[in-house]
Image (cartoon, rainbow, N blue to C red):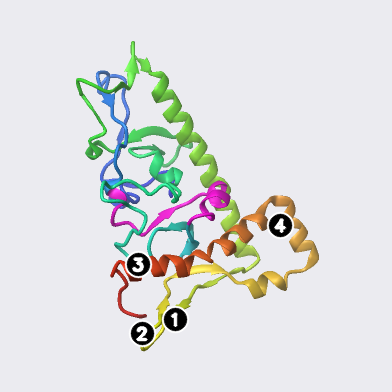
């Protein structure tokens, strides 16, 4: 979810990033993201805190492992498994599509490390922007088209969401609320339970043990409802497992 990825460390889905130019790309047109083939084998997608409330209605929200944990919307319990895609590479209507995906192939990037301003870039390998005969113009009379301005605004809103998410994650660390996650699911007919690890989740015991002033601060900052949305979303874990099991996509225990 980084705002300014380096070329050698591009974020999920991006193969390259090129600054959008009114000179080099004056005749470019854009196509809509009419299918989500790139998502078909993706089991987890970054999520901002602004999306917790709607995302928790349909799928689990967990946090990535490691020191720089970030929120993830789960589409499957194993890498390479997405249980919310149909045969046409479209997301099933009950699933939530994060803004991280909806902004693709665009992204705001800090081109110079010593400067704070961000530039609108795109992934040229996406096939969604080019010198096409048909499509939505990217520029009009040398200026960004209305659609491009709307894209820029969306990406700016996404970046603001990223900053709020960073602040939220810092608060979780401040209160030491994250723990290594483990989900154990008993399946009828299986000799052993299925155990899933490799993610983080909020420690409900530590949450209950917080002092009253800490809880009030979390409520006032809007953090507490987000924590509850995360915890509530975990009820989808068994359902997601069952869908995977019935599809024959459950992998070995552990």
Q: Earlier in the sequence, mark 1 or mark 4?
A: 1
**Residue toward you, 193 or 155:** 193
Q: Residues within 10 Å of mark 4 (few under 14, many from 20)?
A: some
Q: Is residue 141 or residue 84 the one in the foreground? A: 84
- SS assignment at label 4: helix
> Residue 218: which numbered mark, if any?
4
Q: CA distance from mark 1 to mark 4?
A: 35 Å
Q: Which one is in front in this view, the residue at disc 1 or the one at disc 4?
A: 1
Q: Which residues are magenta?
A: 38-58
Q: At which x and y percent is residue 105?
A: 33, 38
Distance Cα–Cα, label 3 vs label 2: 15 Å
Q: Is residue 160 above or below residue 96?
A: above
Instruction: Give the labeled residue for mark 1.
Output: 186
Q: Residues within 10 Å of mark 2 (few under 14, many from 20)?
A: few
Pointer 1 or 3: first along the chain = 1
What residue lies at 57% left-to-right and 58% top-to-bottom?
A: 169
Where disc 1 sits, the SS reads loop
Q: Nearer the viewer, residue 49 or 54?
A: 54
Res. 66 in view = no
Marks 2 and 3: in contact by CB < 8 Å? Answer: no
Q: CA distance from mark 4 to mark 2?
A: 42 Å
Image location of residue 44, percent across then percent down: 39, 58
Q: What label does residue 244 carry, if any?
A: 3
Residue on which the image places disc 2: 190
Q: Foreground mark, 4 or 2?
A: 2
In magenta stretch: residue 35: no
């Amino acid at each position: 979810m980084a705002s300014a990825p380096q070329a050698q460390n591009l974020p999920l889905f991006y193969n390259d990033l090129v600054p959008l130019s009114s000179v080099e790309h004056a005749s470019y047109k854009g196509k809509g993201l009419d299918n989500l083939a790139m998502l078909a084998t993706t089991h987890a997608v970054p999520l901002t805190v602004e999306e917790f409330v709607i995302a928790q209605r349909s799928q689990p929200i967990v946090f990535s492992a490691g020191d720089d944990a970030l929120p993830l919307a789960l589409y499957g319990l194993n890498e390479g498994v997405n249980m919310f895609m149909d045969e046409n590479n479209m997301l099933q209507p009950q699933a939530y599509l994060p803004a991280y995906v909806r902004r693709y192939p665009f992204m705001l990037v800090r081109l110079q490390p010593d400067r704070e301003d961000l530039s609108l870039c795109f992934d040229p390998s996406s096939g969604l922007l080019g010198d096409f005969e048909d499509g939505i113009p990217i520029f009009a009379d040398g200026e960004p088209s209305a659609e491009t301005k709307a894209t820029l605004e969306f990406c700016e809103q996404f970046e603001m969401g990223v900053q709020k998410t960073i602040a939220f994650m810092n608060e979780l660390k401040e209160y030491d609320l994250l723990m290594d996650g483990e989900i154990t699911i008993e399946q009828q007919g299986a000799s052993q339970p299925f155990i899933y690890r490799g993610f983080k989740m909020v420690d409900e015991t530590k949450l209950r043990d917080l002092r009253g002033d800490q809880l009030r601060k979390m409520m006032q900052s809007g953090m507490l409802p987000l924590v509850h949305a995360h915890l509530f979303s975990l009820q989808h874990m068994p359902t997601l497992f069952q869908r995977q099991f019935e599809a024959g996509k459950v992998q070995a225990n552990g």
